[in-house]
Amino acid sequence: MPRQFRSAWLKTLATLAALLLVAGLLGALLGAPATVVALAALGILAWHYWRLRQVLRRLTARQRWETADGTGVWNELDRLLHRNQQEMRARKRRLIDMLRSYRAAAAALPDAVVVVDRNTQRIQWFNEAATSLLGLRHPVDMDAALVERLQPLPLSHWLAGGRNAEPILDASSPVDPGIRLHLRLIPYSDHHWLLVARDVTKLLHLEQVRRDFVANVSHELRTPLTVVHGYLDMMDPEDFPDTGPMLAEMRKQSQRMAQLVEDLLTLSRLESQQHTELDTVAMSSMLASLRREAEAHSHGRHTIVVEDTADVDLAGSNKELHSAFSNLVTNAVRYTPAGGCITLRFANEGDGALLAVTDTGYGIPANHLPRLTERFYRVSSSRSRESGGTGLGLSIVKHILGLHQARLEIHSEVGRGSIFACHFDAEHVRPRSAPLSPPSTEAPPA
Ligand code: ADP
């Protein structure tokens, strides 16, 4: 118990005792001490009851507490309650100020922010940008059903995904179809979601300009390169003893440029493609063709192994998947020194399938792995150029797999080799129509 409260308590007790003593003396003088003491005790009780009632009334009416003068427990209690009330009011003011400043910050955000009740999926709050980007209006849209209010946006399926909902990368605004939006759903408490919509019109436009530029430049370069390449092909270096080596180098470089242009055009085409057709891709003939390509590239310097244990084929674009797998196989040959082994494995993986290209080549340091599928990213430029690489192969692979909702996983160890594994989900496999051939683990004769 605090000191001042203890002394107030003692003072009150002393006053009580004094009052009762005086009442006792008075009672003795009047000849009825018990009656007078009882009356005095009743009076004291009534006074305390009245003070208690006062405190309770003020507490329930949430009245402002005045500082009390004087001594005694009731005055001390008044002072304590006054102090607590002051502290609480100050804390409340601070909280309100903080809330106001957070709201002002959220309101000033250029992105549309909408607070949604998780259970009812109704709008709880939104900022100004939600008016310009999503068309929400104060106060009519407060408590409106989100999905109904933002009707043209594909939200119902999306909201059902909840925490796992992938961002919607490109949707048109309900206000103006020319405004392109990027939508994200952020569950921030057990009861609330935050819907954030960002205007990405300029970004998408710039992206389109970049894509068009690359596609146009590549297209424009294609014809002159074909001409140069054609003339160079007609000239036999043996007919020009002085410039023979120069001619051979020019031929090699023009070939590289032609390949670069072709790869850039392929990438532009893949980037502008939203989805791909789902044909059945016969994997036994695909694997046979990949094996032939690997052998042609290897010129007998490597052991090529094909393992086919799957009882399914893939569903997708034959041409594109062939291009992706062929890129992986070509890389395996190019980045594996003579004498190494390259294994192509196609197998069931849960309800889906896996195609993995494993080599025993140079391997890739771990710090390069995350950036490997970026355009023109090379671990060693000289080795890549030497082997005729354009730096676009894995980028093409990533795009093609993306169009098939497949995933590329890379494991590598320097000096031991690499595994490039393509994982396909259940929607991209089909039962194999031809009877399953006995699992082949064949290597060509050395
Ligand atoms: P490039 O045309 O240069 O081969 P890619 O996009 O196909 O371009 O590959 C990017 C880089 O990844 C290559 O330059 C090479 O350094 C590395 N790489 C790809 N495949 C392998 C592999 N099987 N073994 C080792 N390094 C590889």
Image (cartoon, rainbow, N blue to C red):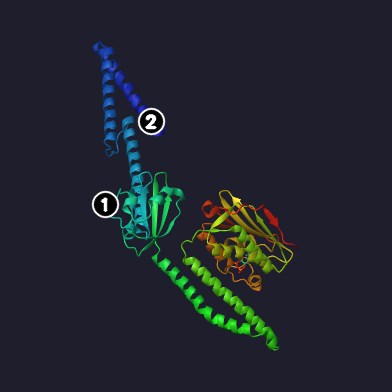
Q: Nearer the viewer, residue 25 or 60?
A: 60
Instruction: Give the percent coordinates (x, y) of residue 180.
Output: 38, 63
Instruction: Give the percent coordinates (x, y) of residue 138.
Output: 27, 54
What quarter of the picture does the N terminus occupy? top left
The earlier-in-sequence mark between 1 and 2 is 2
Instruction: Give the percent coordinates (x, y) of residue 424.
Output: 55, 55
- Asked whether residue 328 appears in the rendered view, the answer is yes
Query: Which residue is denoted by mark 2 in the rendering?
Result: 7
**In the displayed structure image, the side of residue 380 where residue 197 appears, left or right:** left
Q: Amino acid at mark 1?
A: Val
Q: Residues within 10 Å of mark 2 (few under 14, many from 20)?
A: some
Report which quarter residue 201 is drawn in: bottom left
Report which quarter residue 339 is drawn in: bottom right
Q: Residues within 10 Å of mark 1 (few under 14, many from 20)?
A: few
Q: Nearer the viewer, mark 1 or mark 2?
A: 1
> Real-space Cα distance between discs 1 and 2?
60 Å
Q: Where does ligand 1 appear, by image quarter?
A: bottom right
- Residue at 40% in and 49% down: 193
Q: Which mark is residue 302?
A: none
**In the displayed structure image, the side of residue 175 where residue 311 appears, left or right:** right
Secondary structure of residue under mark 2:
helix
Q: Which mark is residue 140?
A: 1
What quarter of the picture does the C terminus occupy? bottom right
Q: Is mark 2 within 8 Å of ligand 1?
A: no
Taking 334 as reference, is 249 above or below it? below
